Image (tube, grey):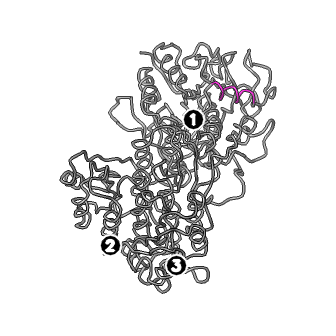
């Protein structure tokens, strides 16, 4: 066991305070709430019961408000008949350029000099996991909620990945914080292998690398940052690091601060790692004195800024630090930028791209001592765009109704046997109908409660289905709409509905599936994401039924008793469907009752896909996980041929992209416009289709 330490020569705490505390898992965010005309008072009362006060009431453009809501509160609001939608506000901007950037960021986006700005690709490391093996990371607000769970290997009794020294938070801030980070949308995973004094042992670092190989999601691009070093070599650790590289994870290592040969420092001596030396603001190798300065030599791959680097500090302040520890995370961030646009690139390809794109010959030749005269340049080393392909498409419109029509038009030919029609104001009826529609090879189309939107009328006119089934009662789809639908078919218009969402789901199942169905899926009726994933997975083989958290509603219990499916799959974790419900379900099947769930809606959708679809699926649909309408029609269109995966605001894309990497589907369809599935995600999808 060999001692290791952080590679920082100077710590100078600044007087600036980093803003905020750690965001919660479901932090409140701005939402726009649109309500039925005259329903403002009712909705205000409901908001008050939630402890929410609207911050603005529309007077000209809509009936409704803006307010800070959690996703759970928004989901709850959208179950109310008086609420037409509660949609999250979307980011808006003109260019991905940071003004008044720290000098180190300013320096790495151009060949020479600085201009006060840092320009970077809009993908900004989105979907890339960066493992920071260090003293831990304090999840400050400037990380924007992108610090994922990691692990503590120190055995010092703290049992936390929170930083108590400052080095790890500073490093992570340089990689991915919003103010000081190179890759402002990457995900940080803290692996605490060094104690509060900044020291540790290689065996703990080895455990951390082993943890990465065990826990890294398949298909997700990854980077390990090692701003650590020791004078003695631990061959087992170096073998572990090489194994990570061989597994496709790029490793970035600090060259060391001894003003000596980098090949004599571990892990900088690993040939396949990217070894980073530190440069100054004057474009020279950093040197303080004979014993303190950036290591050098042919083992170095390139230089990056490493002196007086401003970044986050564990106690909420901002600090200046100097050392190759500070240079390495600039390169780790650059790797994340590259991998966001080229997620399948090998570590060797990434290293070659960074070296070939580096600014050559700009460093002072004095003191390089055989080091390459290469300074990191993130703009010159950017990955090429994803390959152009007709296998990636977007089905979307200006609103949920146009999107529903677009999904149908891209999937179904005229003359389908049946078209299902559901309200677009709420989610349950359309979700319960998704598997029924797949069973009958027809679409789910969304209408307003009191009108058929023009886009839906046009699509029904094109389809001319042989029958139309309206999902939900008269409060969901008014009698006038029901009557008007008769003009679009030569067959019957019928209604399937019940007293509530649970009874409606049971009625849809009873009208579609015979007793002894292969499977029945059960999801919470309180929110949409889990049932959405189940609708695509069911694919017409069995129903998606809805349940309360703690009890099975009587209508659903009666339908399960009639159906007697060969197995039952519960969607979502114990927070949405209680263990008592799972136990009670065993009375309704002679087969297994299993649960598919994840840490959140994104992970649950990926888990349902992984349990249902083999690699090479025909199609995968991608929808926003922060609002339901775009995805409703996609679950029916998937038709059992592939999943509906969810992406979230900004950083919540990891589970979906990892599952796409496993699936390698023949086609990928993004549901909704750029406000739903953003351009950076859409532009990268070409890397994930089968080739």
**Residue 491 rendering spot, x and y as whole percentages:** 47, 73
Of the pair 79 and 114, the residue shown nearer to us? 79
Q: CA distance from mark 3 to mark 2?
A: 25 Å
Q: Is residue 355 covered in magenta?
A: yes
Q: Which residue is under mark 2?
A: 500
Residue at left offset 22%, top offset 51%:
589
Q: Which residues are magenta?
A: 348-356
Whichever of labels 2 and 1 marks the residue nearer the N terminus, that label is 1
Mark 3 vs mark 1, CA separation in Å: 51 Å
Under circle 2, the secondary element is: loop
**Residue 149 in the image, given as x and y percentages of width and height:** 42, 41
| Sequence-first disc among 3 and 2 | 3
Mark 1 element type: strand
Residue at 57%, 75% in the rendered image = 453
Q: Nearer the viewer, residue 462 or 114?
A: 462
Where residue 11 is drawn, which disc sits there? 1
User: Residue reaching furthest front?
Assistant: 490
Q: Nearer the viewer, residue 188 or 506?
A: 506
Q: Residue at x 62, y 31 (%)?
A: 345
Which of the two discs, 3 and 1, sits closer to the camera?
Answer: 3
Say which quarter of the image contains residue 342: top right
């Amino acid at each position: 066991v060999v001692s290791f330490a952080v590679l920082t020569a100077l710590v100078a705490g600044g007087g600036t305070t980093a803003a905020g505390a750690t965001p919660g898992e479901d932090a409140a965010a701005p939402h726009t709430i649109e309500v039925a005309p005259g329903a403002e008072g009712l909705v205000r009362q409901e908001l008050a019961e939630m402890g929410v006060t609207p911050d603005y009431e529309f007077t000209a453009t809509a009936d409704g408000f803006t307010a800070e809501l959690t996703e759970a509160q928004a989901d709850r609001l959208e179950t109310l008949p008086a609420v037409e939608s509660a949609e999250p506000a979307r980011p808006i901007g003109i260019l991905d350029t940071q003004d008044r950037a720290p000098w180190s960021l300013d320096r790495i986006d151009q060949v020479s000099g600085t201009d006060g700005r840092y320009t970077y690709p809009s993908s900004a490391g989105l979907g890339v996991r960066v493992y920071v093996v260090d003293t831990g990371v304090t999840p400050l607000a400037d990380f924007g909620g992108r610090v994922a769970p990691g692990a503590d290997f120190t055995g010092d009794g703290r049992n936390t990945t929170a930083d108590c020294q400052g080095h790890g938070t500073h490093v992570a801030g340089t990689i991915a914080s919003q103010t000081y980070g190179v890759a402002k949308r990457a995900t940080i995973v803290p692996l605490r292998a060094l104690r509060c004094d900044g020291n540790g042992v290689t065996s703990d670092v080895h455990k951390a690398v082993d943890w990465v190989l065990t826990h890294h999601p398949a298909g997700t691009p990854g980077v390990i940052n090692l701003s650590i070093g020791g004078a003695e070599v631990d061959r087992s650790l170096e073998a572990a690091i090489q194994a990570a590289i061989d597994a496709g994870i790029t490793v970035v290592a600090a060259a060391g601060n001894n003003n000596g040969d980098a090949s004599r420092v571990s892990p900088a001596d690993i040939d396949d790692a990217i070894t980073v030396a530190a440069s100054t603001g004057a474009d020279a190798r950093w040197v303080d004195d004979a014993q303190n300065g950036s290591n050098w030599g042919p083992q170095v791959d390139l230089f990056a800024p490493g002196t007086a680097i401003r970044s986050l500090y564990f106690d909420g302040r901002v600090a200046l630090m100097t050392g190759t520890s500070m240079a390495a995370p600039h390169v780790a961030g650059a790797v994340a930028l590259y991998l966001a646009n080229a997620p399948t690139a090998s570590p060797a390809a990434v290293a070659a791209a960074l070296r070939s794109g580096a600014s050559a010959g700009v460093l002072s030749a004095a003191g390089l001592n055989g080091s390459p005269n290469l300074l990191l340049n993130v703009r010159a080393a950017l990955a090429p765009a994803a390959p152009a392909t007709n296998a990636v498409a977007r089905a979307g419109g200006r609103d949920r109704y146009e999107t529903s029509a677009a999904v149908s038009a891209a999937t179904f030919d005229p003359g389908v046997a049946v078209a299902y029609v559901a309200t677009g104001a709420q989610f349950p009826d359309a979700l319960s109908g998704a598997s029924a529609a797949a069973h009958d090879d027809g679409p789910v189309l969304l209408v307003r409660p009191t009108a058929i939107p023009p886009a839906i009328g046009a699509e029904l006119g094109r389809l001319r289905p042989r029958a139309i089934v309206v999902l939900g009662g008269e409060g969901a789809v008014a009698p006038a709409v029901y009557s008007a639908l008769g003009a679009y078919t030569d067959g019957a218009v019928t209604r399937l509905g019940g007293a509530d969402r649970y009874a409606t789901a049971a009625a849809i199942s009873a009208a579609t599936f015979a007793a002894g169905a292969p499977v029945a899926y059960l999801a919470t009726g309180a929110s949409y994401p889990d049932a959405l994933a189940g609708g695509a997975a069911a694919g017409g083989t069995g129903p998606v039924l809805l349940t309360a958290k703690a009890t099975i509603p009587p209508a659903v219990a009666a339908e399960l008793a009639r159906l007697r499916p060969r197995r039952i799959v519960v969607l979502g974790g114990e927070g949405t469907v209680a263990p008592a419900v799972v136990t009670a379900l065993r009375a309704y099947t002679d087969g297994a009752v299993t649960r598919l769930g994840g840490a959140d809606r994104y992970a649950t959708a990926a888990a349902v896909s992984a349990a249902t679809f083999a690699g090479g699926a025909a199609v995968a649909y991608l929808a926003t996980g922060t609002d339901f309408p775009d995805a409703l029609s996609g679950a029916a269109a998937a038709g059992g041929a592939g999943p509906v995966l969810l992406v979230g605001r900004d950083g919540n894309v990891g589970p979906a992209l990892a599952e796409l990497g496993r699936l390698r589907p023949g086609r990928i369809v993004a549901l909704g416009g750029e406000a739903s599935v953003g351009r950076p995600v859409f532009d990268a999808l070409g890397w994930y289709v089968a080739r």
